[in-house]
Amino acid sequence: MEIEKTNRMNALFEFYSTLLTEKQMNYMEMYYADDFSLGEIAEEYDISRQAVYDNIKRTEKILEEYEKKLHLFSDYIVRGELLESLKKYASETYPKDTTIIKYIEQIQEVEE
Amino acid sequence: MEIEKTNRMNALFEFYSTLLTEKQMNYMEMYYADDFSLGEIAEEYDISRQAVYDNIKRTEKILEEYEKKLHLFSDYIVRGELLESLKKYASETYPKDTTIIKYIEQIQEVEE
């Protein structure tokens, strides 16, 4: 499996898994997060390897469509970079000020 | 129309309208954002008042379900309050520092 694709799917899954069906969730989690093979998932659910494959391909498209419409992942990246830059600036400019850092960390925690 | 309900629906619409069908979008926008009556929407689309009503009620539920699953609106509120507090703290504590304020404003712009 491509590592880049795997990382992206795991990230999109973090944001949109609640919009998937239970079956879609299970297959995606086993395949992308837990590194099961298509054959192993097929065996586990007693269905064909092709059915698992089709379901996963379809779910990948669904996740990409949600990202296109809601861009939660890309917003998260942009916001995260800005927060990190602000954190760096504040801790270098005002090394004794812990208040700013606490605010930044609270903001970072909102999406988790 | 209750003002609280109207405000909430307009807010949820801001976050999730891209997940709705064109018809759902149009009815919600006319009813909640532009204050058309059910009768006026019905006339505009040449369908029954009841059909418009049912569609809007159904769409309200869909928006609330998305919020329950993704909580974009409530996250936005929490993050917004933290960013405002941080802004206030920074501008009071370091009134000459414009860098922090610029970062905060960039972060606020990410979701718009």
Image (cartoon, coloured by chain):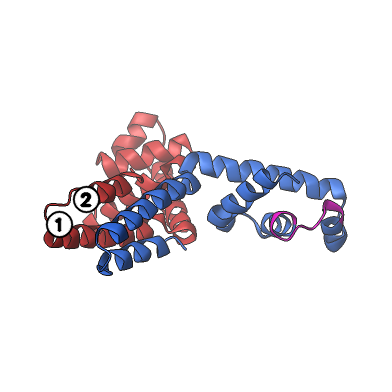
Chain colours: A red, B blue
Is B33 one of the magenta-colored residues? yes
Q: What is the span of residues highlighted in magenta in the rendered image?
A: B31-39
Badge 1 marks a residue whose secondary structure is helix
> Is residue A33 depicted above or below B92 in this figure?
above
Which quadrant of the view contains residue B33? bottom right
- Which percent across, then down, holds residue B99? 26, 68
Q: What's the residue type where badge 1 is placed?
A: Ser
Q: Chain of mark 1?
A: A
- Which percent across, then down, holds residue A34? 25, 38
- Which percent across, then down, holds residue A25? 41, 39
Residue A101: mark in rendering: 2
Residue A107 located left or right of residue A68? left
Which quadrant of the view contains residue B61? top right
- Residue neighbourhood size for the residue with mark 1, other residues' Cα within 10 Å, grouped as few (<14), some (14–19), many (≥20): some
Label 1 sits on residue: A91
The residue at 37%/59% (across/down) is A75
Badge 2 marks a residue whose secondary structure is helix
Residue A38 seen in the figure:
no
